[in-house]
Image: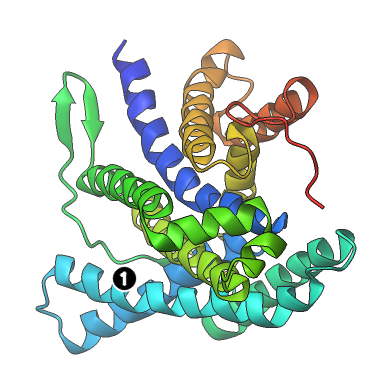
C-alpha cells in the first residue's frame, strides 16, 4: 500500500509539470489550430537560463539564500521565455496563419531544432547539475510515503498557476478576448478585438508557464540539458490530446492522469515482468495512451465534437 501511495505522490508531481506545459499547447491550438512542437524546447530554455542565473549568483554571492536565488532565477527565466514565445509567434507563425496546415507544423519542428541547436552552442552537449535550491530532507506525510520540499513546491505552484490561468481566461477582459478569438478570430476582429495582440499574448502566457515548468523539472531531477525539453514536451502534447486539446481543464486533467499512469505503471512494471523490464520503460505509457485515445475518443476526455471553423 505504501508503494502505491508513493507512486501516486510521484505521479501528481510529474503530472503537474506535464499539465503546465500542456496548457501552452492547448491555448495555442484553441486559438490558432496550431500544434507548436517547439513549446517543449521553451521549457528547456527556461531551465537552462535559470541554471545560468543560479550558477552566477552562487559564484558572486555565495551566501545568498536558496529561495532568493530561486526567485531571481525565475524572475529572469520567465521574461526570457515570454520574449522567446513572442518572437516565435511574430517571426515563424504569423505569416503562416492562412497557409496549408502542414506548413506551420513543419515550421514548428524546424523552430524546435533551431532552439536545441542554439542551446547546444551556448551550454554545450553535457548534462549540467541543477543547483539545489530546496532542503533535501524529505517529509513523511504518511508512514512509508515520502515527499521532498521541491515536490511540495511543484504541487503548490502548479495548482496556483492553473487556478490563476482559469480565472484570467474566464473572468477578465483579456480572457474574454481570448475566448472570442478562439471562437472565430475574423468575427472577433470585426468586433474590435486586436487578434494579433491576443494571439501574441497567448504565446507569451504559454511560454511563461513553460519556463516555470522547466525550472520545476530541472529542480526535481537535478539536471538540465539542451535536449531535455523534447520528451516532456511530447508527453505534454499527449496530455493535451488526452484531456481534449483546446480545453484548459482537459489539459490539466490529461497531465495529471498521464503522470499517474506513467509513474504507477513504472512502479509495477518490473514486478509484473519478473525483473525482465525496469522502470526505464515508463515512457511507453504516454504513447500507448495517445494511441488508445485517438482510436476510441479522438476528442479527448473533456473534448467536445465541434465542426471546423470557416
Q: Nearer the viewer, residue 75 or 67?
A: 75
Rendering coords of residue 140 (x, y %):
15, 29
Tell me if 52 is positioned left or right of 275 in this view.
Answer: left
Q: Is residue 148 in view from this perspective?
A: yes
Q: Is residue 295 above or below residue 96?
A: above
Q: Nearer the viewer, residue 178 or 5?
A: 178
Q: Is residue 57 above or below residue 221?
A: below
Rendering coords of residue 189 (x, y %):
64, 69
Residue at image mark 1: 74
Tag 1 secondary structure: helix
Q: Which residue shows up at 59% across the image and 49% down it?
A: 26
Tell me if 296 is positioned left or right of 193 in this view.
Answer: right
Question: Number of callouts in the render?
Answer: 1
Q: Classify the position of the N terminus by image quarter.
A: top left
Residue farthest to the front, as pictured: 191
Rendering coords of residue 306 (x, y %):
73, 35
Q: Which residue shows up at 78% across the image and 78% down it?
A: 95
Amino acid at each position: 500500500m505504501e508503494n502505491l501511495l508513493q507512486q501516486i505522490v510521484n505521479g501528481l508531481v510529474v503530472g503537474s509539470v506535464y499539465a503546465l506545459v500542456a496548457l501552452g499547447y492547448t491555448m495555442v491550438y484553441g486559438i490558432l489550430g496550431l500544434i507548436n512542437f517547439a513549446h517543449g524546447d521553451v521549457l528547456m530554455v527556461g531551465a537552462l537560463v535559470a541554471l545560468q542565473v543560479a550558477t552566477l549568483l552562487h559564484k558572486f554571492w555565495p551566501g545568498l539564500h536558496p529561495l532568493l536565488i530561486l526567485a531571481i532565477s525565475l524572475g529572469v527565466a520567465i521574461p526570457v521565455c515570454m520574449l522567446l514565445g513572442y518572437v516565435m509567434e511574430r517571426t515563424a507563425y504569423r505569416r503562416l496563419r492562412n497557409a496549408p496546415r502542414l506548413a506551420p507544423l513543419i515550421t514548428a519542428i524546424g523552430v524546435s531544432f533551431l532552439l536545441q541547436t542554439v542551446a547546444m552552442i551556448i551550454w554545450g552537449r553535457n548534462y549540467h547539475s541543477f543547483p539545489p535550491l530546496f532542503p533535501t530532507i524529505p517529509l513523511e506525510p504518511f508512514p512509508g510515503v515520502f515527499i521532498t520540499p521541491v515536490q511540495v513546491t511543484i504541487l503548490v505552484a502548479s495548482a496556483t498557476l492553473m487556478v490563476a490561468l482559469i480565472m484570467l481566461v474566464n473572468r477578465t477582459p483579456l480572457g474574454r478576448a481570448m475566448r472570442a478569438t478562439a471562437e472565430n478570430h475574423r468575427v472577433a476582429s470585426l468586433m474590435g478585438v486586436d487578434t494579433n495582440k491576443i494571439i501574441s499574448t497567448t504565446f507569451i502566457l504559454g511560454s511563461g508557464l513553460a519556463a516555470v515548468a522547466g525550472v520545476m523539472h530541472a529542480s526535481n531531477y537535478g539536471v538540465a540539458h539542451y535536449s531535455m525539453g523534447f520528451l516532456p514536451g511530447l508527453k505534454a502534447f499527449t496530455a493535451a490530446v488526452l484531456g481534449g486539446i483546446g480545453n484548459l481543464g482537459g489539459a490539466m486533467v490529461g497531465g495529471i492522469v498521464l503522470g499517474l499512469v506513467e509513474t504507477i505503471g513504472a512502479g509495477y512494471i518490473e514486478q509484473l515482468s519478473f525483473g525482465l523490464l525496469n522502470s526505464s520503460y515508463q515512457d511507453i505509457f504516454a504513447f500507448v495512451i495517445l494511441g488508445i485515445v485517438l482510436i476510441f475518443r479522438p476528442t479527448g476526455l473533456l473534448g467536445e465534437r465541434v465542426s471546423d471553423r470557416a
